[in-house]
Amino acid sequence: MQSMWVEPILAVLSGYLLGSIPFGLLLTRLSGGGDLRKIGSGNIGATNVLRTGNKAIAALTLLLDVGKGALAIFLASTFSDGLGVLAGLGAFLGHLYPIWLKFAGGKGVATLLGIVTALDPVLGMVFAVTWLAALAILRYSSVSGMLAAISVPITAVIIGQYSWTPMFIGFALLVIWKHRANIERLMAGEEPKVGAS
């Protein structure tokens, strides 16, 4: 009976460890940009990496943060389809709350894109289109990320992926929670737009 829990627990833990790799922090430091946590918003994600002025490192951070969410699912799914979802959950929590950084991680938008794309490409496409369209129109990285996260459970219901919907609602709520400081700045009219000096 106990053995039936071993694989699910290992899937969550392996996903967590993969998701907790702080690529933005590591790449910024390796490129001579210093400690990302002391720059801009202090966040370890690609948007804050962009504030260092290094667009290449920001783009690479984005790709790696997306990739680790997808990779966690693909690796776990090679053992069992059901384990992929658990690994994705672990990767998302690992990015948001990495043990190496005293649980102060990123906001989860890029990693969530990788997770939902690996689970269902339709969800990933809607997420990406929502994210990019909102960013192009509003130019607020925080708003576009939250809208993209919210689009996932809505799309899941529309296409009939009901079993994943509760988890996606939880993901969206966590993304919004991690953006609470941004929401306060938006309400105060102090949130910087992408590309603003």
Image: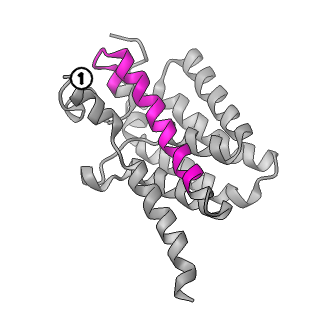
**Depth check: 141 or 74 in front?**
74
**Where on the picture, by quarter, is residue 26?**
top left
Q: Where the C terminus falls, by quadrant?
A: top left
Q: Image check: 143 left or right of 21?
A: right
**Depth check: 144 or 98 in front?**
98
Above/below status of 172 relative to 55:
below
- Asked whether 74 falls inside the magenta stretch, the response is yes
* Location of residue 183 in the rendering, given as x and y in whole percent from the top left corner: 43, 36
**Range of the magenta residues?**
49-75
**Mark 1 belongs to which amino acid?**
Ser
Residue 42 seen from this side: no
Residue 13 seen from this side: yes
Provide the residue designation for mark 1: 31
* Location of residue 124 in the rendering, given as x and y in whole percent from the top left corner: 66, 37
Q: In terms of secondary structure, what is the magenta stretch mainly?
A: helix
Above/below status of 6 relative to 18:
below
